[in-house]
Amino acid sequence: MLGRLNHVAIAVPDLEAGARIYASVLGARVSAPQTEAAHGVRVVFVELPNTKIELLEPFGENSPIKAFLEKNPSGGMHHVCYEVADIMAARDRLVAEGARVLGDGQPKTGAHGKPVLFLHPKDFCGTLIELEQA
Ligand code: CO
C-alpha cells in the first residue's frame, strides 16, 4: 500500500531561522515561506534529491503543532508522509485493521494540493503518519 516517502516534517519555533539553517549551514535549496491557514501552519520546503523536508511553524491560535512545540521548544520531527495511490482505499484498509484516522476521517487538501489523512501516532510506533494521494 505504501509508496514513496513524500516528506519528513520538522516543527520549528522560528521558520525563518530554520530556513536559514537548511539554506546556509546545510546548503540545501529552500522554498519561500507559505501560509497554510487551513492547517494552522506556515511552511517552507527543503528540496532534496530524493524527497523533501518541510519545516513547520505554528500559524494562528489553534495550530495543531503548538502543543508539540511546547513539549519540544527547540523543534523536532513532527511527522512522516508516505504516498499512496488511492487514499480512500488506504483509509478503509487501515480502519479495518483497527488504526485510528485523525479528525473526521475525511481527506483534506494538503500543502501540495493533494488529498491527505493523518494516522494516530500511538498506532504507528509513536510516529504521526500523513498519507498523501500521489
Ligand atoms: Co506533511
Image: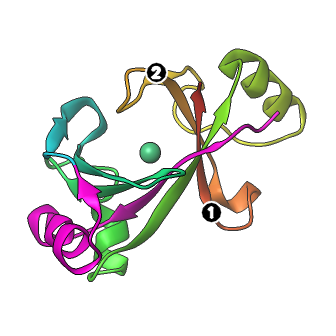
What's the mark number on residue 108?
none
Query: Magenta segment: does it hold 35?
Result: no
Q: Nearer the viewer, residue 97 or 83?
A: 83
Q: Is residue 109 above or below residue 29?
A: above
Q: Which residues are magenta?
A: 1-30
Amino acid at the residue labelled 2: Lys
Q: Which residue is mark 2?
A: 114
Quarter of the image where the C terminus is located: top right
Which residue sits at x=30%, y=37%?
A: 39
Q: Crowding near pointer 1: few (<14 within 10 Å), some, many (20+)?
A: some
Element carrying mark 1 = loop
Indicate left or right for 67 with 128 as reference. left
Indicate left or right for 54 with 118 as reference. left
Which residue sits at x=45%, y=63%?
A: 78
Between discs 1 and 2, the one toward the N terminus? 2
Q: Residue 118: where, in percent of width, then height?
A: 56, 40
The residues tagged by marks 1 and 2 sit, at their Cα atoms, a distance apart of 21 Å
Q: Which residue is mark 1?
A: 127
